[in-house]
């Protein structure tokens, strides 16, 4: 779920092929791509009006009420018997799966067409019902954290409870930031009319925006307009950039209000819960220490001149310019082969790359194609970008993307299937332990991309094609590492400034331009129009400070892949063990078998050196040409 334009592999968009890109318009373009799958959500529920939905909502509410009546005020006493406490946790785990199934279906059904009022209402109604049910269970984690440490440790020695020890350890980390039950209940109930409603407004606004691009036969939605920023023709890139700027600027008052409101909402929540730094709550959720993130950010920012600045200077030369206009940043190389990759070929490319690493990996990924666990085609109202929704362990993940046939779309497919494989492997951990912190959740996805890229590169003999492929990968890695750390820096500045008072659109625009200039370097001309491009980045709205997880994952994967290339002992077994662990182990435990330590700043530099080495390789190709 990476956020970037036009690549956007992960909650935002991939590159897309427009109808106008193929002779004969949309039907011809669709025909070139072949048949693409649409989700079969029946493993969750068959339809929004299926009687099972009401049955399960009622059953979930009833079970939550039962648990509250049976356990509230009694958990300290039950903790004296680890077996009794294990019954409570298994009840909680079972209900988490049942409620998660309902929430997953509502979210995925809504994502298929966020412009449909009926789907929006269904999503809103289910979300409201689930919030009400979860409110009955707020007491449980609060009371568990009041159990004396020695009593809890003795209870965890019971074999039925022992497997939940990592979950209890994570829960204990929440204790300093938990409030009494009535206040936590208020925060939970108000979330529907605060953050939840503002996020929904953002989603539905983005899905409804139309962009009039000069030269295009009809107004476009966000995905195909962003895709034009990677068109071979500069005139089309410029026209798309101007259309994006015009529409974003027209909606800046709304996006400014969204940003101010959500930043203030977070500040209120953080203040009440005792979080000091603007990103502390995200670090806690990610189970990563602030100094680790600080080391990552410092390493990446120090490397900007060696990475993005140097690369974009080279690219400007390749395109025959002194400086690149901002709409040229993702332009293809002049001699880059541009072809449409049909869906069946994309499937074969990714599965072959996965199979070359481990047959089990390809076997798991193949299920997504065979069983319609992927929704691939661009459709009106569909959520932009791509993601893999883990849903719940009792079902399976679903992958969403907007596939229109470019090589970067194949990389997006490889990325999201990496998430899907990871989520499938972690299912045995159960609802409480399967979820993986964001910092490690990107490991399998980025590794899947790297496998696919290396497989394609090894089959390429033409020097110009090879250069184009390496350049494209460098751009992807810059977007994953440099851009995401710049996004994180932008978010920090916005949230810190919002604590001093409301921000004007001009102030947000100025912060955006300052940080983008620092990260992209002097070879990118951030001319008029680019100042409003912060408006469409969904992670700023959905998940504040999420973005550094992409840089974390990319640098981690670079180190892991280096070990794999060096034939590290039992690498595949260790890698699968890492994925199967889900959220049951801290990142330090998971990386220890590989001899890696994210607390060491040199760890991040090793990852960045891989990207720097690829830029060195491009420079060497230029000298040899």
Image (cartoon, rainbow, N blue to C red):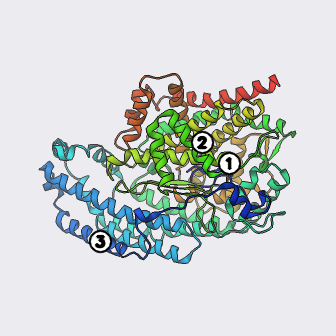
Q: CA distance from mark 1 to mark 3?
A: 47 Å
Task: Establish if 597 lies above or below 44.
Answer: above
Q: Confirm or deny contact between disc 2 and disc 1 (CB under 8 A).
A: yes
Q: Which residue is mark 3?
A: 61
Q: Nearer the viewer, mark 1 or mark 3?
A: 1
Q: CA distance from mark 2 to mark 3?
A: 46 Å
| Dot 3: element | helix
Label 2 neighbourhood size at 10 Å, few (<14), some (14-19), many (20+)?
many
Q: Which residue is mark 2?
A: 349
Left or right of 142? Residue 486 is right
Closer to the N terminus: mark 1 or mark 3? 3
Residue 468 occupies quadrant: top right
Q: Which residue is mark 1?
A: 341
Q: CA distance from mark 2 to mark 1?
A: 10 Å
| Dot 1: element | loop
Residue 101, x across and y down, in percent: 38, 62
Closer to the N terminus: mark 2 or mark 1? 1
Task: Establish if 131 lies above or below 328.
Answer: below
Q: Confirm or deny contact between disc 2 and disc 3 (CB under 8 A).
A: no
Residue 383, x across and y down, in percent: 58, 63
Residue 624 occupies quadrant: top right
């Amino acid at each position: 779920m990476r956020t970037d334009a036009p690549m956007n592999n992960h909650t935002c968009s991939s590159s897309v092929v427009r109808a106008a890109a193929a002779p004969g318009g949309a039907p011809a373009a669709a025909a070139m791509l072949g048949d693409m799958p649409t989700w079969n959500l029946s493993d969750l529920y068959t339809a929004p009006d299926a009687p099972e939905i009401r049955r399960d909502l009622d059953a979930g509410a009833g079970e939550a009420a039962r648990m509250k009546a049976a356990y509230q005020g009694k958990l300290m006493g039950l903790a004296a018997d680890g077996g009794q406490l294990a019954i409570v946790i298994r009840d909680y785990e079972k209900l988490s799966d049942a409620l998660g199934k309902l929430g997953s279906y509502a979210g995925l059904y809504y994502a298929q067409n966020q412009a449909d009022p009926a789907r929006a209402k269904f999503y809103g109604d289910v979300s409201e019902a689930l919030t009400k049910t979860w409110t009955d269970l707020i007491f449980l984690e609060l009371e568990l954290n009041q159990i004396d440490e020695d009593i809890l440790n003795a209870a965890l020695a019971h074999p039925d409870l022992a497997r939940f020890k990592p979950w209890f350890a994570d829960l204990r980390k929440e204790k300093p930031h938990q409030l009494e039950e009535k206040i936590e209940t208020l925060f939970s109930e108000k979330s529907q009319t605060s953050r939840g409603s503002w996020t929904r407004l953002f989603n539905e606004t983005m899905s409804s925006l139309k962009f009039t691009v000069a030269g295009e036969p009809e107004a476009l939605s966000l995905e195909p307009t962003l895709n034009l920023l990677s068109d071979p023709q500069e005139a089309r890139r410029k026209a798309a950039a101007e259309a994006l700027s015009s529409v974003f600027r027209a909606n800046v008052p709304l996006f400014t209000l969204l940003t101010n409101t959500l930043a203030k909402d977070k500040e209120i929540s953080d203040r009440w819960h005792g979080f000091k730094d603007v990103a502390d709550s995200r670090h806690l959720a990610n189970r990563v220490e602030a100094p680790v993130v600080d080391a990552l950010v410092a390493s990446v920012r120090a490397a900007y001149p060696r990475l993005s600045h140097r690369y974009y200077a080279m690219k400007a030369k390749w395109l025959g310019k002194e400086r690149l206009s901002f709409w040229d940043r993702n332009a293809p190389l002049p001699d880059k082969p541009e072809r449409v990759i049909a869906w069946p070929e994309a499937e074969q490319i990714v599965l072959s790359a996965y199979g070359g690493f481990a047959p089990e990996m390809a076997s798991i990924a193949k299920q997504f194609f065979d069983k319609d666990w992927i929704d691939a085609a661009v459709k009106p109202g569909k959520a932009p970008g791509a993601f893999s929704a883990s849903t719940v362990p009792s079902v399976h993940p679903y992958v969403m993307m907007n596939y229109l046939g470019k090589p970067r779309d194949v990389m997006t497919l490889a990325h999201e299937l990496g998430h899907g494989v990871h989520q499938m492997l972690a299912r045995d951990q159960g609802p409480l332990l399967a979820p993986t912190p964001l910092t490690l959740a990107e490991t399998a996805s980025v590794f899947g991309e790297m496998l696919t890229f290396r497989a394609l590169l090894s089959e390429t003999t033409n020097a110009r094609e090879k250069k184009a492929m390496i350049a494209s990968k460098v751009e992807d890695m810059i977007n994953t590492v440099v851009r995401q750390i710049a996004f994180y820096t932008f978010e920090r500045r916005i949230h810190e400034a919002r604590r001093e008072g409301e921000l004007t659109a001009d102030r947000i625009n100025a912060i955006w331009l300052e940080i983008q200039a620092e990260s992209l370097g002097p070879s990118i001309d951030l001319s008029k129009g680019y100042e409003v491009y912060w408006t469409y980045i969904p992670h700023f709205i959905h998940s504040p400070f999420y973005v550094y997880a992409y840089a974390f994952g990319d640098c981690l994967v670079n180190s892991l892949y280096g070990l794999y290339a060096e034939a590290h002992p039992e690498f595949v077994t260790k890698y699968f063990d890492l994925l199967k662990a889900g959220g049951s182990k801290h990142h330090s435990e998971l990386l220890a078998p590989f001899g890696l330590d994210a607390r060491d700043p040199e760890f991040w530099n090793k990852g960045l050196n891989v990207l720097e080495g690829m830029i060195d390789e491009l420079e060497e190709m230029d000298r040899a040409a």
